[in-house]
Image (cartoon, rainbow, N blue to C red):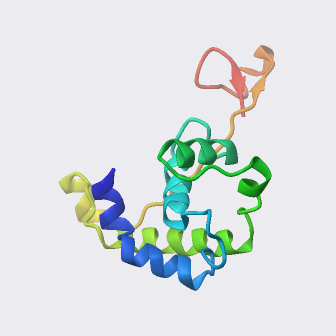
Amino acid sequence: MREVFEATLPEDALRQIITEAKFEERNRKRDALAFVRAMVISASTGHGGRQRDVARIYFENGAQRVVRGGFYAWFGKELEHTMEAVAQRALRYAAYLPLDTPRLLADYARDFHIVDSSTVKLPRELFGSFPGAGDYAAL
């Protein structure tokens, strides 16, 4: 985990982002660097980056405890600007990595588009017109 953070978001770059977004001004109890890292880590947990999960990761890793209301007050425009800059930096880093694709695909692929979708299960009687991935009808 440390190698990924240091490659994608080196400490100096992360501190600069935090400073430019003014996320660390006048806040003695918050370790902004640890907080942002907890935000990134919590996004990949099964809880989907909920504030409570951020708090758990942040405090379990040794940060000074604060009351719940104080913690939730940290989720403001400064954090939003910080996380936007973190996301942009991570995307720029990823764009410069070489493609890890099979040879045939690497020869022809120039861009990838990932599409997420939802499946709606329909009544079984509609299977002939709307076959699903299983033995059910779906859109």
What residue is shown at x 49% (from left), y 65% (from top)? 33
Q: Which residue occupies the foreground of this view, 106 or 24?
A: 24
Image quadrant of residue 70?
A: bottom right
Q: Is residue 88 above or below residue 54?
A: below
- Circle count: 0
Q: Quadrant of the C terminus?
A: top right
Q: Which residue occupies the foreground of this view, 71 or 75?
A: 71
Q: Is residue 109 visible?
A: no
What residue is shown at x 65% (from left), y 71% (from top)? 27
Give x and y (percent) for residue 133. 58, 25
Q: Is residue 137 left or right of residue 5?
A: right
Give x and y (percent) for residue 47. 61, 37
Q: Is residue 67 above or below residue 12?
A: above
What residue is shown at x 71% (from left), y 22% (from top)? 137
Q: Is residue 46 visible?
A: yes
Q: Which residue occupies the foreground of this view, 10 or 62?
A: 62
Give x and y (percent) for residue 123. 81, 18
What residue is shown at x 61% (from left), y 69% (from top)? 28
Give x and y (percent) for residue 126. 78, 21
Q: Residue furthest left?
A: 103
Q: Residue furthest bottom?
A: 20
Q: Is residue 25 left or right of residue 9?
A: right
